[in-house]
Image: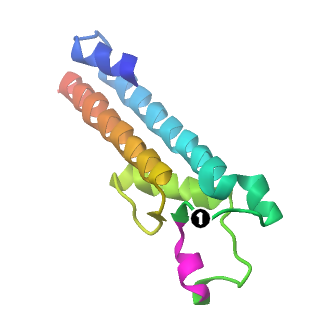
Amino acid sequence: LVMLSHHLLTGGKENGHALIVSGFVLWCTNVLLFGLWYYEVDRGGPVARARDDADFPDFLFVQMDKRQFAPEDWRPQLVDYLYLSFTNATAFSPTDTMPLTPIAKWLMSGQALASLVTVGLVVARAVNILS
């Protein structure tokens, strides 16, 4: 992201289509990377969650707070963390899942910033080239 941003700001010579594709691939990588990161960080990771020696949660999912929306033994799965990552990268902020710990807040802030830079620089430059 840093190299691509520097290249765009210093006037690289790409065509608009290649930049749109690069921006999309970078954004998808952001979603996958942070989704896996959230999965690994929350309550000590998947092994600790499976053994039930997990600490307090790093993320508060709706199903944890409102038990009428999920089975009693509901626990977040990988798809829940990928969805969290997708909504954070799309909205640039938490949507239905709230970060509870400093590490969760820093991770979500970093992801939102990376997503904003990707959309702001890459797409704006590509649109400028296309027009």
Q: Residues within 10 Å of mark 1 (few under 14, many from 20)?
A: some
* Amino acid found under the numbered disc labelled 1: Pro
Please state which of residues 18 and 31 is positioned toward the viewer in this rendering: 31
**Magenta stretch: residue 13 in it?**
no
Left or right: 114 in relation to 52: left
Question: Which picture quadrant has residue 116?
Answer: top left
Residue at the (56%, 39%) spot, across then down: 33
Furthest toward the bottom, the residue is 68
Up-down: is 52 above or below 5? below
Relative to 55, does residue 16 appear above or below in the rendering?
Answer: above
Vertical relation: 57 (above or below) 127: below
For the magenta stretch, what is the residue range? 60-67
Residue at x 57%, y 42% (from the top left corner): 32
72 is higher (above) or lower (below) than 86:
below
Find residue 87 and report its horizontal and vertical position in percent.
Answer: 44, 57
Counting every numbered tag in the picture gives 1
Q: Position of residue 10 (x, y in %)?
A: 22, 11
How far across and how far down the image is residue 37, in percent?
59, 44
Percent position of residue 72, x then y: 71, 85
Task: Look at the image and tell me in which quarter the C terminus lies.
Answer: top left
Residue under numbered circle 1: 57
The residue drawn where x is 26% and y is 29% is 121
Q: What color scheme is it? A: rainbow
Could you tell me what secondary structure mostly forms the magenta stretch? helix
The quadrant in which residue 20 appears is top left
Q: In the displayed image of the protein, which residue is found farthest to the right? A: 51
Quick one: SS at disc 1? loop
From the viewer's perspective, tell me whether residue 76 is left or right of residue 96.
right
Question: Which residue appears at 49% of the width and 49% of the height?
Answer: 103
